[in-house]
Image: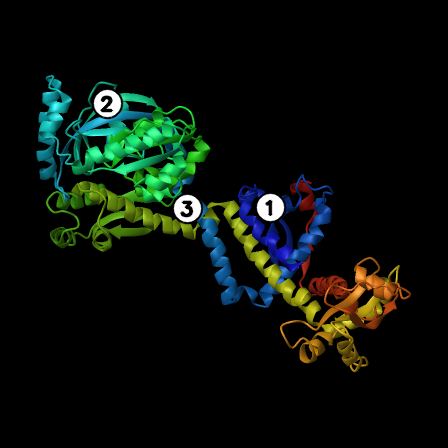
Amino acid sequence: MKSFFRGLIYSAFSCLAVSSLSAVENDPVLMKINGKEVLASEFSYIYGKYHTNSQKEKTSVRDYVPMYVNFRLKIEEALSDGLDTTKAFNKELSGYRGQLSRQYLDPARYAESLLRSIYDQSGEVVEASHIFVKTPAKSLPADTLVAYERIMQIYERLKKGESFDKVALDASEDVGSDTERPGYLGWIYPMIVIQPITDAAYATPVGAFSYPVRSTFGYHIIKVHGKKANPGEVLAAHILISAQENNLLQAKHRIDSIYSVLQSGGDFSVLAKEFSDDRGSAAKGGELPWFGVRKMVPEFETIAFSLVSPGEYSRPFRTRFGYHIIKLLGKRPFPSYEDMKEDIARQLPRSDRAWEFRGPQLNELKAAYGFRLYPDAYREIIRVSDIYYPKDSMFIENASTLDKPLFEIGEDIYTQKDFVTYIKKQLPSNYSFSTDVIEDKMNAYVYGLLLKKEEQNLEARFPEFRNLMTEYHDGMLLFEISNKEVWNKAGKDTTGLERFFKKHASDYKWRDKRYKGVIVLCKDEAIRKRLDGYSKTLSTENVDDIIKTHFNADSIPEVKVIKGIYVKGDNPLVDQICFDKKRRDISLPDGYTCYFEKGKRISSPESYKDIKGIVISDYQEELEKEWVQSLNRKFPTEIYWDVIDRNIQN
């Protein structure tokens, strides 16, 4: 009973979209309980959850009102007992609120169009290279100007017709660039490389190069080699023979020998386990995790995606790791939006698109809480960052002298000094350009303040959140007060249970007689005779203690106990011994030669203990009725039936 009821309380987490009345003028008072008003929105929310179309027997509004009143009376009793003030109660309620609030504070709630656009763009992959001119890790406007002038000179060379590869080899500062394909990025798509490169690559036609774009690392010119539909993912196994410049011939000979065995019918998995130098995958027959574009080195990726049918394997080929043979195990297409949406939302806060992701929520909160920026004051801080990098001591020293109002949120005003103090305490920014750092920190400062306000005001902003929190609060109180007044009370009140049983004994008669007693299976006759000494005192209540104390002392049990109340058919051995007294060929379990029996057949229970579970349940119902009657006497109730009839639909 208790666990079932608590399950009903907790199930509210899955019900986030229940409509309710919210406008005050359309939210009349339906009743008063202990002087507290119950609005139509409160009642209709609970009734709407209880009164679902799936119920076989629907409860009318008029029939439901007394049930609701009794529920609210129990809450009043819990409040009068102070159950809502305990440390345990508030800790549990706070935990519920924390879980629920995360759903409402999640920026993904406001970023559906961004998530969809990233997914749509990811349906195509772009093969690209870039020419890169870096800026310092801490860049001031003067630093970026030098880099900008250099990238523009490179851009002019490309416009005049110089080969992209030649200019990249000559001028690019991408230190990891391959000399055979200078600046080669491979196949890219959103969230794989930084956003400025991605956006430029998608916007540039195949065979063309982009106008210079700036990232947090410097300036880039993007050359697009090709575009194609996202091929999805492959599942593959491989055999790797590691190779360095000093053992290429030996490694090539080994991989060719393995390939010959495969062509002669050798088992790929067995060969991978025995010979592959990739010991992580070798243990699994060479199998790798599913992978898509840019998850492997380009040569490996190209060969893997070129295989067509599961079971097909490649010819040996070389990467910087050595020589490989790949076997295709499976392919799966580019996933659906619903399958990718959560993963995209999880990656965005850690990417360079974090503020693009949080932007819609930030704008919504600014409007909701009356954010207003003072542009002149903000420009003063920007001017300091033009000279000193925001995380350097000279910036802090000079900017700390500023103390004008910078922005306001509602009636709260925050100064330039408040913002500089915030910058001083924060970790370094992911941005290198000084003004980008200021913008990043400003967004973070305002976002944090607004998010805190939002968390504090969720009940006022979202009626469904308020309804759910009220439901959690009242449900927990209902559980605790019912436990105190009914459930635990019934289980512990042995005097009350016995009195209730005697009063209602006629309700518990059985149609067929039952056996009540103890059967003890014995290893031998000597043990059975020892049990005869306890025949006067032994009962179903004390048999376990007697056996534990005087028998079964060693690891091999001397006796086995069967006890309780049985109807014929419940237990074959009890049937033989107790319901068929004339039977002599009783079949005992292996290891036991005789038995001791003490009991009788009865027509009805002799004590509430004989049917304890049933009596406790019935006693709880009686206590519940008496309790509700006392609550109705204790707390005054006014019900406005005419208002209910006009405003609440069945």
Q: Is residue 309 visible?
A: yes
Quadrant where the C terminus sits is: top right
User: Upstream in the sequence, badge 2 or badge 3?
Assistant: 3
| Rendered position, 160 above or below 170 | above
Tag of residue 621: none
Q: Are there few (<14), some (14-19), or many (20+) residues within 10 Å of tag 3? A: some
Residue at label 1? 45
Q: Is residue 363 left or right of residue 597?
A: left
Instruction: Tell me the SS state at disc 3.
Output: helix
Amino acid tagged 1: Tyr
Q: Position of residue 493 (x, y in %)?
A: 71, 72
Q: Are there few (<14), some (14-19), or many (20+) residues within 10 Å of tag 1? A: some
Q: How far apart are the two marked residues, 2 and 3, measured between alpha carbons?
A: 39 Å
Judged by depth in the image, the label closer to the viewer, 2 or 3, is 2
Tell me which residue sits at (10%, 45%) in the image: 387
Q: Is residue 3 left or right of residue 540?
A: left
User: Upstream in the sequence, badge 1 or badge 2?
Assistant: 1
Tell me which residue sits at (47%, 57%) in the image: 95
Residue at label 2? 224
Q: Quadrant of residue 4?
A: bottom right
Q: Is residue 83 left or right of residue 398?
A: right
Quadrant where the N terminus sits is: bottom right
Q: Quadrant of residue 474?
A: bottom right
Tag of residue 105: 3
Between 387 and 162, the residue placed more toward the observer is: 162
Amino acid tagged 2: Val
User: Upstream in the sequence, badge 1 or badge 3?
Assistant: 1
| Rendered position, 53 above or below 396 | above
Q: Position of residue 214 (x, y in %)?
A: 19, 33
Q: How far apart are the two marked residues, 1 and 2, measured between alpha carbons?
A: 57 Å
